[in-house]
Image: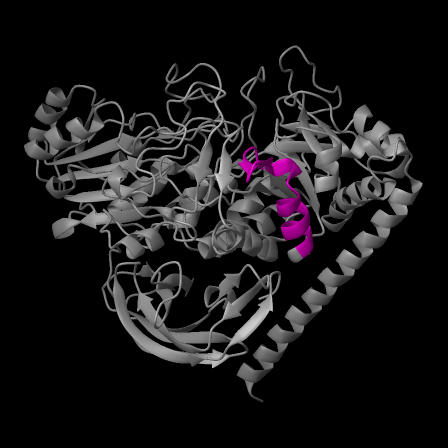
Amino acid sequence: MNKSNELKKLVIATAVALLCAQAHAADNADARATQAVAALTPDEKIKLVFGYFSTDFNGTKKPEPGIEGAAGFVYGIERLGIPAQQITDAGIGVATQPAAKTPRVRTALPANIAIAASWNPDTGFAGGAMIGNEAHLSGHNVMLAGGADLQRDPRNGRNFEYAGEDPLLTGVMVGAQIRGIQSNHVISTLKHFAYNDQETGRFIADVKIDDPAGRMSDLLGFQIAIERGNPGSVMCSYNRLHGTYACENDFLLNKVLKGDWGYKGYVMSDWGGTHSTIPAALAGLDQQSGWPFDKSPYFNGALLESVQNGHVPEARLNDMAHRILRSMYAHGLMDDPAKVQPERIDYSAHAKTSQAAAEDGIVLLKNDNGVLPLVDSYKTIAIIGGHADAGVLSGGGSSQVYPEGGSPVPNEGPAQFPGPIVYHRSSPLQALAARLHAKFVYHDGKDAAAAATLAAGSDLAIVFATQWTAESVDQSDIKLPHGQDATIAAVAAANRKTVVVLETGSPVTMPWLNAVGAVVEAWYPGTNGGEAIARVLTGEVDAAGRLPATFPADESQLPRPKLDGLGLPEGTRFSVDYNVEGAAVGYKWFDKKGLTPLFAFGHGLSYTTFSYGKLKATPANGTVNVSFNVENTGKRDGKAVPQVYVSRVGGGWEAPKRLGGWDKLALRAGESRDTTVVIDPRLLAVFDGRSHTWKIAAGEYKITLATAADAPLSAVTVKVPARAFAAGAK
């Protein structure tokens, strides 16, 4: 018996059975939703489409059954066995709203940008499954995650909640997180749809972008995330698109999401994102969320009256209720009701899940002369800055997850939203001291001269630099704040063996780069972040992350050197013209303009070495299969992230190349493995606005194997036939 063939047959049979089960579940959910809608009264339908804030706010009390400190609440229909929707933020863990009296303690994942930096869908799924489990055991059945807005600008305050600048990487990683969350019978909400790519003027900014450019950038990221994750809900964003608010934008919600992509779930508004009753309902909004953030309860009595008077067809209200109920049935909310039982949360195991995710996403940016991993031969090590003696930084806003005992660094940052600044109680200093026999001496880094004096008297200096970013506010530039560049420069001048650990939510500039020995991007590393940083610095685990976003040399390299809307009087309406770069986001912009970044998209070093060979590209089933071999040629176990970029010979695209796929391979020292990457056909195509289709032009395409966007290894060309396919197909 050929065991290999038998195994393949078993895998195929299992996959087919799973697909059949999913199709049956979807059909069953449709039927159950149809039956339930037929039994609903008009008032009960309105209950399903109108959501409240589940926290006392601006003099308005939360609904009594709502979970205190949560993001939202929607009444259920008890007589039909339809549970209330208990809604929680966000993609990093079970958050507590800043207005709440007592923050709940839960496990925090690393920032989503750190998860994306893992380039590992399994890491995304595991993290999603962990926070989904904590949500379910906290009584929540809807989670406002994950975020798929592209990083068009490194100054965006919410970049830490998203997955970088590339639509393929974003769609795959966010889709995996959504699958993980929903494996716990919790609806995951994909957000913010669409083009919510800056916080400045987020409630009023009017985005201009041509449809083909949008389809090949931001919208493609959302489309792939929906295909991969099947989220029960999509949240429309605050901003306007071509003059119309996203939550009443017929093009976004009806034509693209529900029409072209065939999305069967429901659309909820962002908190404060609803601006009308009739236009919003007719344009595809299914649920108003977070009253009283909006100016009026548009989807309460006003919607019922609009239906009764014929301004909104009754069939539309039925569709709204059906979509909500279908998602609730499809994702098990009725069959496995969430209950408040936090005593069942395995915090120890979940902290390890968070730690593993952090380790998988920490990026080694620079490592001269083998400064890292640290050897246990230093007598004195100076730890400078970043409150590294106390904990690790987290991002601010509605996604904030609180640690047990509160932040170990109190009274920093704004007292009100999006503050406070919260650190997780996982000290990198303590974690390093548990692994190395050196004497550790700490300095807060606020006095550059004193920090330099300490560094000069030490064998090694590790500077922890922080950049707090948060919802509702963008950075005015991409420099490290609070004079930290001067401190790093002074320390590096005093001690050539200086390591910089960055805890940031976005790319930052590094004027001191040439003077330091090593740079590590740790992002916001979550509940066990200090342990994760220590394990990477000491080489207990490989530096396994790769950049999901380009690090510019400075703001002059950006499509908008000055952020649109920055400095305008509050409430001033303005436009953001994304046609400047169009679909050439991130590394594509740098390629198109011939710019050299500080660090390229996909960049990341390892503690071992890899060789790559046997590159082959073959047309198959309307796309291209790319195969190659990866070998760990070093003496350490490590993780390789081979990346496949595709270019059209002769040009004609928004930029010279696109990410076509990748793999992440954990290889033992000396181990070799073959792998195959299948190019998504949309990454060989151009979206044609006239015919409303994706079109692959016949001709030659260059397939490049690389370790980063600026680090090609080898290339082959392949001839691809012409092909056209629908906007919602692939």
Residue 544 can be seen, yes or no = no
Residue 193 can be seen, yes or no = yes
Quadrant into which the C terminus falls: bottom right
Q: Per the image, is 246 magenta?
A: yes
Where residue 709 sits, quadrant-wise, is bottom left
- Left or right of 148 on screen, residue 627: left
Q: Residue furthest front?
A: 690
Q: Could you say where residue 415 lies in the image, as x and y percent from the top left?
A: 44, 14
- Left or right of 229 on screen, residue 154: left
The colour style of the image is one colour
Judge whether 463 appears above or below 422 on screen.
Answer: below
Q: Per the image, is 649 magenta?
A: no
Q: Could you say where residue 513 lies in the image, as x and y percent from the top left?
A: 16, 41
**Residue stretch in magenta:** 237-259
Foreground: 406 or 36? 36
Q: Residue at x 19, y 39 (%)?
A: 499
Q: Residue at x 60, y 46 (%)?
A: 181
**How many discs appear?**
0
Judge whether 256 appears above or below 455 on screen.
Answer: below
Judge whether 39 appears above or below 717 on screen.
Answer: above
Q: Could you say where residue 441 lies in the image, as x and y percent from the top left?
A: 18, 26
Judge whether 233 appears above or below 631 on screen.
Answer: above
Q: Could you say where residue 337 lies in the image, as x and y percent from the top left?
A: 75, 39
Where residue 223 sits, quadrant-wise, is bottom right
Q: Residue at x 12, y 20 (%)?
A: 450
- Left or right of 722 on screen, residue 494: left
Foreground: 693 or 19? 693
Q: Residue furthest bottom?
A: 1
